[in-house]
Image: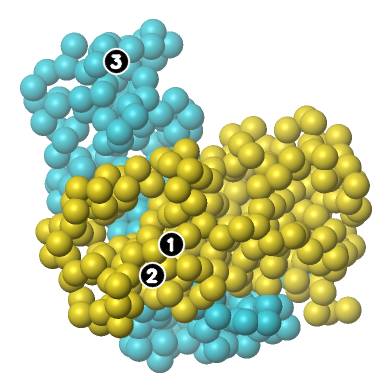
Chain colours: A yellow, B cyan
């Protein structure tokens, strides 16, 4: 049975300002909640109509599926919704390959990029403050639990990039990512869905790279940023094992 | 000014059965409508609050933004919505590299894959009948006009694959796409988001390929199918220009 305060808390966590003030976020779905439960993330409460979550003792709140439908952030509710603590930040390890995001707006794109970092063994993802919040419910769902294996840090991208080399950035007219020598360490910057990398950040980039376009027409304006991330990370990693 | 019949027609085109019976589909947004207007697709009607579309004479229907909001398939309406004819099918050119989809469900994934085909110069995309309809409004929007440069054909995948070689398929445990020799012609099959390639189609595949997973944990269960398509097509094309 849900209390009014619990409903109010869960609804408030849709908004970034309340996630920050409460230091909490919401996760839904058996698979994704399972990934967070099996990680270092600290469970606050798990709401479910399934007895399997009773093992979380005082953190378990038994609710009906109708109640879950009311508190879900999605059109189709799942049989479990959980609240976790937002962990304190872990220092970025700049000695490896780090992916940096400049103002990614779409939650689905950020979630997919987190999943890609996990797949390609990128431990650190850094984002400027104008990138969508990684604890946004849609980001959490589309990363399918990869949050638990990728360290995501929000910082002032301009100030850190000025001290890091090599710094790669993706552009429409850069060097082919297929031909260019790619380092096993450094930073790779991906830009906003509509506007690409900002002028201020472009000024800090050492190497402009791009994904070659094929076909006779070559009219495709751009690739979706998550697809660009997939290809770029794949190329960096492919070259790292070819050496 | 919209007539009741026009509203009824536009709403009916949300459903595949009515798109098939009317041989029409809906496109929204300045950019995407523009791509279709500059293509071989036959315009039926263009509804807009912008005078710029008046040049389409009797096909232009001037409407208010409020009317567009009522007929839009999306939460945020655009200032233009158009109806186009579904063209008759063009024979598949099996002499190049063809991408084949086995039961892709998500409209956003199909739209993104169409855009990837366009980027990588894949002229033919073939889908089995259980793949989401390419004239679904969400597919049309997420392909951002690439529909006009990729020939999409729905067919019985099992019957055509049995006669085509080489036939590649993506699996979790296949040969690394980085190391394996990739042909410049043949078919590459991508499977359903949750279940992968069906057993029936797997039996027709000559070469199992996969995208290597990196990182110490290697716990990421899978990549999003559109991201997998991005990496696989990128590798096929990279190798084709390296020869």
Residue B230 left/right relative to B35: right
Q: Secondary structure at mark 1?
A: strand
Distance between mark 2 and mark 3 Cα atoms = 42 Å
Q: Earlier in the sequence, mark 2 or mark 1?
A: 2
- Which residue was labeled with disc 3? B65
| Residue at horizontal 68 percent and vertical 72 percent from the top | A121
Q: Along the line of sight, which residue is nearer the eye, A182 or A64?
A: A64
Position in image of residue A52 (x %, y %): 25, 82
| Residue at horizontal 68 percent and vertical 78 percent from the top | B215
- Which residue was labeled with disc 1? A84
Q: Chain of mark 1?
A: A
Q: Quadrant of residue B46?
A: top left
Nearest to viewer (mark 2 / mark 1): 1
Label 3 crowding class (10 Å Cα cut-off): few <14, some 14-19, many 20+? some
- Furthest residue toward left: B4
- Which residue was labeled with disc 2? A33
Q: Is residue B58 above or below residue B14?
A: above
Residue B95 appears in view: no
Position in image of residue A103 (x %, y %): 63, 39
Q: Is residue B140 above or below residue B72?
A: below
Distance between mark 2 and mark 1 Cα atoms = 10 Å
Nearest to viewer (mark 3 / mark 1): 1
- Furthest residue toward bottom: B203
């Amino acid at each position: 049975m849900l209390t009014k305060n619990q409903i109010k808390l869960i609804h408030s966590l849709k908004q970034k300002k309340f996630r920050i003030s409460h230091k909490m976020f919401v996760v839904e779905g058996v698979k994704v909640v399972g990934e967070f439960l099996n990680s270092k993330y600290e469970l606050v409460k798990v709401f479910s109509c399934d007895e399997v979550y009773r093992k979380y003792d005082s953190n378990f709140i038994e609710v009906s599926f109708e109640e879950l439908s009311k508190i879900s952030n999605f059109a189709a509710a799942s049989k479990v919704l959980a609240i976790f603590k937002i962990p304190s930040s872990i220092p970025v390890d700049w000695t490896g390959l780090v992916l940096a995001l400049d103002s990614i707006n779409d939650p689905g794109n950020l979630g997919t990029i987190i999943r890609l970092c996990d797949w390609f063994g990128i431990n650190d993802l850094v984002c400027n403050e104008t990138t969508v919040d990684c604890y946004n419910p849609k980001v959490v769902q589309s990363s399918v639990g990869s949050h638990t294996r990728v360290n995501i840090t929000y910082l002032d991208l301009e100030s850190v990039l000025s001290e890091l080399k090599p710094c790669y950035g993706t552009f429409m007219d850069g060097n082919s990512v297929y031909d260019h020598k790619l380092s096993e360490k450094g930073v790779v910057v991906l830009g906003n869905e509509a506007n690409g990398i900002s002028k201020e950040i472009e000024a800090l980039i050492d190497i402009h790279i791009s994904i070659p376009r094929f076909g006779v027409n070559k009219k495709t304006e751009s690739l979706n940023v998550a697809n660009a991330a997939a290809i770029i990370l794949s190329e960096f990693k492919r070259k790292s094992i070819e050496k």
